[in-house]
Structures are given as C-alpha cells and as structure tokens.
Amino acid sequence: MRRNWSIQVALFSQPTARALAILDLLMANPQQAFGLTEMTRRLNLNKATCHAILTTMANYGFLVQDPKTKAYRLGPSIIAAGNAAFAQFPVLEYARPELEGLQNDLNIGFGVTGRSKMHMVLLALYGSASPLIDSFQLGLRLPNTAPVAACFTAFSPAKYLEAWLTRAHESRGEYNEKLDQKLRVSLIAIRARGYEVTLKTRAEAELTRELSRIHNSWSLTELEEAANKYQHDLCDEYYHLDRIDPKARYEISTISVPVFVYREVPVMCFVAGSFDKPIMGAQVEEIAERMVASAKRVTALASGREKLSQRTDS
C-alpha cells in the first residue's frame, strides 16, 4: 500500500554555510594553511565574500592568519570549542580503550560515528580502517538518509524512522514501495539482533575512488555530490545483511553497534571495518558480540552506572 509522504523544506542560511565550509576545509587538512585565492577556488566562493568571512572568523579567534604568507589556519577558539564539546560528550573518552582493545585483539579497524538531524558524522578512527573509511576525513558527513545510518534509525522512535525513509524517497523523486519494504525489513533485523551488518557494494567502491580523487582538490560541492550519489545508489544494491548464516562466507563492509547513554536514541555507533577478505557468518556474529559487550560497558560508564576503576573485561 502506498504511503503518503511530502517534501519538507529545511531552513538554510547561506552565510552560515559558507563559514562552515571554511571550517570543514581546514579541519579536513589540519597540516595545511590556505590563502584567500586557494580557498575561494576550492570552495567556489566569491573572493570579497570569502575575505569578509575570514576576517571576521580571525577577529574572533576561530582562524589565525600567518603574517608573512597571509594563509589561514584554525585558531585557538576552535580548541576551546572542541574542548567544550568533548566535555559534553565524554562517551568518546570511554570508547577509546574499548575500541583500541578490540582493534588489537581482532586486527581490524574501528570507527565511531555520530548523528545529526541530516547527517551521519565520522568522529574517530582506531587502527587500520577499511578502504572506504580510510578515505574519509574525520568530521566527514554522509546523508542521514536510508539506507545510510540504519543502525541509528533502527533504535530510534518512529518519527525518526519515518523521516529517514521519507528522505530516501525524496532523493529518488518518487515513492518506491519495494524499497520502503526492504528498508523496513532491514531495520527490524538490526533491532532484533542488536547490530547492523553491511555488505561491500559497487556504490562503496565508487565512493572510495571519488573521495581519494576529491581529497587532492577538496571541493565541498564535489564531496556533497559524491556522498548523495552514494546514498542514492545504495538503494539499488544488496546492502544490508538481514539474515546471517554462520556457515556462509560474506564480503563484509561494516559491522555497526549502537551506544546509548541517557536516552533511548543512540548517541553514537561503533563501526568495524577493514575486512580485506570474505569471512564466515559465525565470525561476523563473534565480532558483533564483542562489540556489543564493549558498547554496553561504555554505556554503563558514560551514564554513571559503573566506575572506570571497576571496569572488567568480561
């Protein structure tokens, strides 16, 4: 049966987006400084507009300009903002030893993702990540639109689920009942077993190539276009592994586990990657169970139900 859905227009501030684009560029290239000409070229901004934004951000300490080269880097106000954000998100502090331990034991890479209203954001990396994750810069955003970010959506209230599905239909220009049913089945499977498993796809391989190419020129527009195309193309592929046969071999892309703190909605997800060869379904389940146990320990620590000194490896 066809469901009703409508396009929702989000409020958008162009000046704010331009300032955030500058921060994105500098965060993605922390070892580099950029002059006005290079920044306007990469971000496709008007030179006068860009200069005004840069001057304002430098005056408030968010950027620093080299007096000789006139190039800009991130400034001390960003450090203060980062420390304040980290203080309000202590769960990352508890996640580090857990994921580093898993990385050493299992010899695979791990990442941590967070979610905003419209995006899934890469927050941290541990160990040798998969080709896809390795192409990402910390802070890179992918659309919070089906089928991406399913691990967050599967454990969220119904209104989040419906909005997530609606954005997928909107991205394709029309409602697709077959796609809608496929995504709902995947969410049920994820919630029932407690974690998400995704398979390697052509869309992932193409995004990896695009991110490697874009990294050299770093165009915000190209990044957004590549991420949106990735989400769109995934809808047509066999992406989620809904049923795991312990005796079958799978080309695994990621295993994701939700982490909760004070709310029913996940605050972040642990993501395992770097599977360079097919693995058995039983191994998928074993890795996921280890990740679920780590996520539960982090949840207990972050919510104050367990003291750090009392943590066990059980």
Image (tube, grey):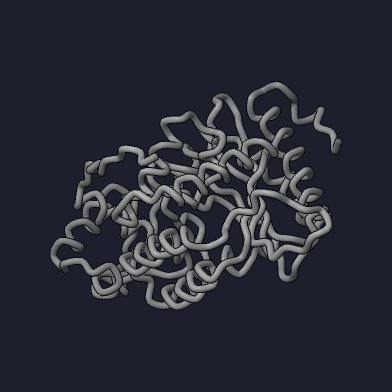
Outermost residue toward the front?
1
294 shown above or below 203: above
Q: In the visual, does 136 lie left or right of 118?
A: right
Q: Residue at coordinates 48% horizontally, 68% vertically from top-left?
A: 31
* Pick the front one: 169 or 33: 169
Identify the image quadrant of the C terminus. top right
Image quarter of residue 36: bottom left
| Residue 178, position as x, y percentages in the image | 45, 51
Q: Residue at coordinates 61% horizontally, 32% vertically from top-left?
A: 260
Q: Residue at coordinates 84% horizontally, 33% vertically from top-left?
A: 312
Image quarter of residue 69: bottom left
| Residue 138, position as x, y percentages in the image | 51, 57
114 shown above or below 234: above
| Residue 20, position as x, y percentages in the image | 31, 53
Whether residue 156 is visible here, answered yes or no, is yes
Outermost residue toward the left?
48
Q: Residue at coordinates 66% horizontally, 60% vertically from top-left?
A: 273
| Residue 268, position as x, y percentages in the image | 56, 41
Identify the image quadrant of the N terminus. top left
Question: How many discs mark residues in the rendered view?
Answer: 0
* Pick the front one: 34 or 266: 266
Whether residue 101 is visible here, answered yes or no, is no
* Pick the front one: 310 or 6: 6
